[in-house]
Amino acid sequence: MSEAVTPLNGARFEGLATIEDAGLTGMITLRGDLASKEVKDAVQKAVGLDIPAQRQAVSGQGSAVLWMSPDELLLICAYDSVSQTIATLEEALKGQHFLAVNVSDARTYLHLSGAGARETLAKLCPVDLSEAAFTPGMFRRTRMAQVPAAFWLDEAGTFHLICFRSVADYAFNLLKTAALPGGEVEIYG
Amino acid sequence: MLILTCPCCGVTGEETEFHQGGEAHLKRFGPGASDDEFHTYMFAKENPKGVHFERWRHNNGCGKWFHAARDTVTLEVYGTYPAQTLEPPKEIRDAITAKRPGWTWREFA
């Protein structure tokens, strides 16, 4: 068995914000009827969390459920418990119309923290990231410069950012450039 | 720059988050359609100065398709509505009439 590594392999940058590789993380795409009781119960059984409302994220200890689209969720769990979690979902959703796929190695997962985190991200995404507009628990899929990305904000003020593995290097360098000291805009005070 | 609201996920985002997908409400004929009908479906597109209906996709967001009614002159967006409709809903048509009385687009007015 080969050793799994993240595309950025633990990269870290400290500038106006701290950008760091979040490490190996289990990610499962779950598609189905999000309003159904079956999907709700299956998610509860698999990661112990509720289904988030539209464009929201529900986080637990080392797990999260993210609202990707009207019929799609992304479940975050420990990297080595993915097959177990998918098995639980498949068992709970037997007979339903659904899809549960391991996408852990198809994504890059970054953490963005520090005082300049909002501003760093706002330089790259066409999203209002002011404290009043983007509050903890919100989840947003958007464009980060030239690539699609998704992020959510936790209670501690850390942004969790996901993009495709193939653009990991680009995304990291992009954030790094946006967070270079000297590039303060201080638009959010 | 257009500001569009995706009716599927509710995001109000700028144009670069979306992708335009051609004219809305195209009618495909067939099977057994005549060459003329297929030609019309394939090539005869509206190119109006003013009110226009288009398909858009939220490609950097939820990935869903939807319809948008907008003005090609003022770049004003009159409204967006689900892709699963055969004609613009009444509130969209009313919004256009309020701004552009007497507008027509294909068979709609």
Image (spheres, rainbow, N blue to C red):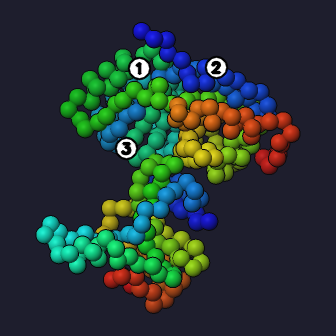
Residue hosting label 2: A10
Quarter of the image where the C terminus of chain A is located: top right
A42 is higher (above) or lower (below) than B67: above
Which residue lies at the image location 45% right of the left edge and 87% below the top edge? B103
Q: Position of residue A145 (x, y in %)?
A: 63, 47
Residue hosting label 3: A71
Q: Chain of mark 1?
A: A
Quarter of the image where the N terminus of chain A is located: top left
* Same-subunit check for callouts 2 and 1: yes
* Same-subunit check for callouts 2 and 3: yes
Q: In terms of secondary structure, where does tag 1 sit?
A: helix
Residue with the most extreme right position: A182
A38 is higher (above) or lower (below) than A20: below
Residue type of the residue flagged with mark 1: Val
Horizontal arrangement in the rendering, residue A95 relative to residue B42 (left or right)? left
Residue hosting label 1: A82
Give the number of the disc on residue A14: none
Which residue lies at the image location 48% right of the left edge and 18% below the top edge? A79
Q: Chain of mark 2?
A: A
Which residue lies at the image location 31% right of the left edge and 34% below the top edge? A99
Q: Position of residue A183 (x, y in %)?
A: 83, 42
Estimate how packed mark 3 is, as few (under 14), some (14 to 19) or many (20 or more) residues with alpha carbons within 10 Å.
Answer: some
The quarter holding residue B87 reads bottom left
Which residue lies at the image location 57% right of the left edge and 79% below the top edge? B73
The quarter holding residue A40 reads top left
Residue type of the residue flagged with mark 3: Asp
Q: Determine the CA span between mark 2 and mark 3.
A: 32 Å
Residue type of the residue flagged with mark 2: Gly
